[in-house]
C-alpha cells in the first residue's frame, strides 16, 4: 500500500497548477464572448461575402476544438489526476492546442488584415511585410509546439531552443500587430468623405483597430516575458491559453463594428471595401444600440 502512495504535494504547487487552471477558465470565458460575437455576426450580416462567412465560422469551429482539448486536459489534470504531480507537470495535448493552434489563428487573422490593407492601399508592399512577420510568428508557434511535444513535461520544456522559438512566435506576432494597426490607421485616415455616417464608420474603425492591435501586441509581449522568468514557472500558460481567442475576438469586434442597429441603408464609397460598409439590418430595429447621428457613433 505504501508503494502506491502519491508523493506529498509541495508548498509551491500553485506556481505550476495555478496558471494552468486560470488559463483554462479564461479560455472558456473568451470562448463565450466569441460565441456571442459570432451569433451577432450571423444575425447582422447574412449578405456578407461567402469567404468572409467561411473565415468567421471556420475560426469559430477551430476555437471550439481548442476549448474542448483544453477542457479534456484540465479534467485529466485536476480531476482524474488530482493530487498527482506528474499529471500537473504533464504537457499532454497542450503542445498542439496552445502554441500551434494559437499561432494558426493569429496567422489567419493577420492575413485577413493584410488583405484589407491591400484593398485600401492598392499596394502589396505593406501586406507583404505583414505576411512576412505573420509567417515568422507561425513558424515560431509551430516550433514551440514541436519542442513541447518532445519535452512531455513542463519542467523539461523551458530551455534555449524553446526561448528562441517563443521569441519568434510572440515577437513576430507583436511586430505584425503593430504594423497592422499603424497601416490600417494610416490608410483609413486618408479616406476622404463629406458624408457623416461614412466618416463615423471610419473613425470607429480607426479607434477599434488601434485598440485591438495594441491589445494583441501587448498580450504577445507579456506572454514572451512570462516564458523567460527564472525558476521555470508556468505563468506563461495563462497568457498562452488566451492568445488565440484574443485574435479571433478582436477580428470579430472589427467585423461587427459595421453594424448600425436599426433600418439603415447601405453606404457606398470608393475608398472603403464593401465588407466594411453598414448594411440594411431590419432585424435589429428594436434593439437598444441605435447610433446618434448628431453625437457620432455609439459604443461598438
Image: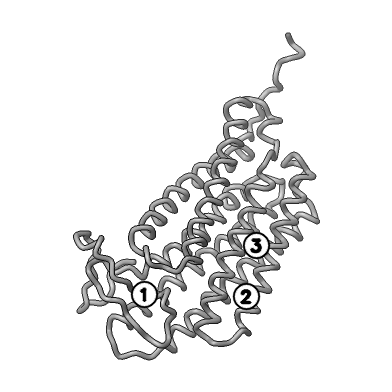
User: Is 270 situated above or below 42?
Assistant: below
> Vertical placement of 254 versus 224: above or below?
below
- Name the residue located 47 percent from the left edge and 59 percent from the top edge: 249
Counting other residues with Cα less than 10 Å from the Cα at mark 2, is it few (<14), some (14-19), or many (20 or more)? many
Per the rendering, the mark at residue 130 is 2
Dot 2 or dot 3: first in sequence order is 2
Of the pair 2 and 130, the residue shown nearer to us:
130
Mark 3 neighbour class, 10 Å CA radius: few under 14, some 14 to 19, many 20 or more: many
Residue 23 x %, y %: 55, 45
Front in this rendered view, residue 57 or 256? 57
Contact, mark 2 vs mark 3 (Cβ under 8 Å): no
Q: Position of residue 162 (x, y in %)?
A: 76, 54
> In this picture, is 140 found above or below 199?
above
Q: Badge 1 is on which residue?
A: 204
Give the mark count: 3
- Judged left or right of residue 112, residue 204 is left
Write the residue at 77% across / 50% down. 147
Task: Quote the CA–CA distance across marks 1 and 2.
Answer: 23 Å
- In terms of secondary structure, where does tag 1 sit? helix
Q: Which residue is mark 3?
A: 170
Between 263 and 205, the one nearer to me in the picture: 263
The quarter of the picture where the N terminus appears is top right
Please say which color scheme the image uses.
Answer: one colour
- Could you tell whether 241 is left or right of 26 in the image? right
Residue that sits furthest to the top in the current view: 1
Above or below: residue 282 compared with residue 21: below
Q: Measure how far apart labels 2 and 3 are at the Cα level.
A: 14 Å
Q: At x 58% / y 41%, what residue is drawn?
A: 70
Q: Secondary structure at mark 3?
A: helix
Please identify the quarter of the rendering in which residue 12 is found: top right
Give the number of the disc on residue 285.
none
- Labels 1 and 3: the sequence-earlier one: 3
Amino acid at each position: 500500500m505504501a508503494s502506491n502512495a502519491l508523493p506529498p504535494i509541495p508548498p509551491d504547487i500553485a506556481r505550476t497548477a495555478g496558471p494552468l487552471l486560470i488559463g483554462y477558465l479564461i479560455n472558456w470565458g473568451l470562448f463565450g464572448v466569441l460565441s456571442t460575437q459570432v451569433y451577432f455576426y450571423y444575425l447582422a450580416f447574412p449578405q456578407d461575402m461567402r469567404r468572409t462567412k467561411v473565415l468567421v465560422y471556420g475560426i469559430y469551429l477551430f476555437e471550439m476544438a481548442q476549448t474542448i482539448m483544453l477542457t479534456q486536459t484540465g479534467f485529466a489534470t485536476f480531476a482524474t489526476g488530482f493530487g498527482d504531480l506528474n499529471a500537473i507537470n504533464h504537457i499532454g495535448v497542450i503542445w498542439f492546442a496552445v502554441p500551434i493552434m494559437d499561432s494558426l489563428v493569429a496567422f489567419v487573422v493577420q492575413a485577413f488584415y493584410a488583405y484589407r490593407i491591400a484593398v485600401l492601399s492598392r499596394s502589396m508592399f505593406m501586406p507583404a511585410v505583414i505576411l512576412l512577420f505573420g509567417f515568422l510568428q507561425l513558424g515560431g508557434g509551430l516550433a514551440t509546439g514541436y519542442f513541447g511535444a518532445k519535452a512531455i513535461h513542463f519542467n523539461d520544456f523551458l530551455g534555449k531552443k524553446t526561448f528562441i522559438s517563443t521569441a519568434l512566435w510572440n515577437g513576430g506576432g507583436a511586430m505584425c500587430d503593430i504594423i497592422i494597426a499603424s497601416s490600417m490607421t494610416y490608410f483609413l485616415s486618408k479616406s476622404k468623405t463629406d458624408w457623416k455616417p461614412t466618416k463615423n464608420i471610419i473613425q470607429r474603425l480607426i479607434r477599434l483597430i488601434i485598440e485591438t492591435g495594441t491589445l494583441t501586441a501587448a498580450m504577445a509581449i507579456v506572454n514572451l516575458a512570462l516564458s523567460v522568468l527564472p525558476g521555470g514557472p508556468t505563468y506563461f500558460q495563462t497568457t498562452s491559453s488566451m492568445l488565440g481567442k484574443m485574435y479571433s475576438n478582436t477580428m470579430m469586434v472589427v467585423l461587427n463594428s459595421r453594424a448600425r442597429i436599426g433600418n439603415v441603408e447601405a453606404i457606398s464609397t470608393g475608398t472603403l471595401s464593401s465588407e466594411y460598409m453598414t448594411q440594411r439590418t431590419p432585424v435589429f430595429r428594436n434593439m437598444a444600440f441605435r447610433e446618434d447621428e448628431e453625437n457620432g457613433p455609439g459604443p461598438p
